[in-house]
Image (tube, rainbow, N blue to C red):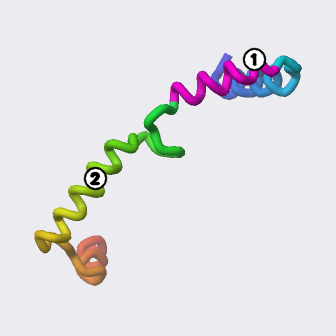
Amino acid sequence: MDIQAQKIELIQMLLSTTKPNVIKKIKAIFEEANAGTLINSSMTVAQLEKEIEEAEADIKAGRTFTTAQVKAHFKH
């Protein structure tokens, strides 16, 4: 069974259940699997904070480019 078929099967099972504890357990599994990860991203909150700190340091050190410089760079 491929992944898409498994997803559909799980959705059907979830929709048909009347047991709140099953839904709570499934939700807990997803929350645990996604702990520390931003929605729709593979980057954790800690990684994002580090990236922001590095970007702020670059700005303070003058390591920046104008929009025109970036556009010119990617035209080539």
Residue bearing mark 1: 22
Q: Position of residue 62 (x, y in %)?
A: 13, 74
**Most common SS among magenta residues:** helix
Residue 18 at x, y = what percent? Answer: 88, 20
- Please tell me how many numbered marks the rendered image carries: 2
What is the x, y in percent for residue 12?
82, 24
Kind of residue sitting beneath label 2 = Glu
Extreme bottom residue here? 68
**Camera-nearest residue between 67 and 50:** 50
Instruction: Choose the circle earlier in sequence order: 1 or 2.
Output: 1
Instruction: Give the crowd class for mark 1: few <14, some 14-19, many >=20 residues within 10 Å.
Output: few
The residue that appears at 77% across and 21% down in the rendered structure is 9
SS class, disc 1: helix
- Picture quarter with the N terminus: top right
Task: Please give the name of the residue rendered at 15% of the width and 70% of the height, measured from the top-left corner.
Answer: 60
Give the answer, above or below, for where 22 lies relative to 37: above
Say which of 68 and 52 sits in front: 52
Question: Identity of the amino acid at label 1?
Answer: Val
Quarter of the image with the C terminus in it: bottom left
Q: Which mark is residue 9?
A: none
- Number of residues whose C-alpha sits closer than 10 Å to that of mark 2, classed few (under 14), some (14–19) or many (20 or more): few
Residue at 51% in and 32% down: 34
Residue at x-position 52% and y-position 26%: 33
Across and down, in percent, residue 52 comes to 29, 57
- In the image, taking residue 74 as reference, residue 8 lies left or right, namely right
Is residue 16 rendered to the left or right of residue 49?
right
What are the residue bounds of the magenta stretch?
20-33
Q: Disc 2 designates what residue? A: 51
Residue 54 position by quadrant: bottom left
Give the CA separation, mark 1 to mark 2.
Answer: 38 Å
Q: Is residue 66 magenta?
A: no
Mark 2 element type: helix
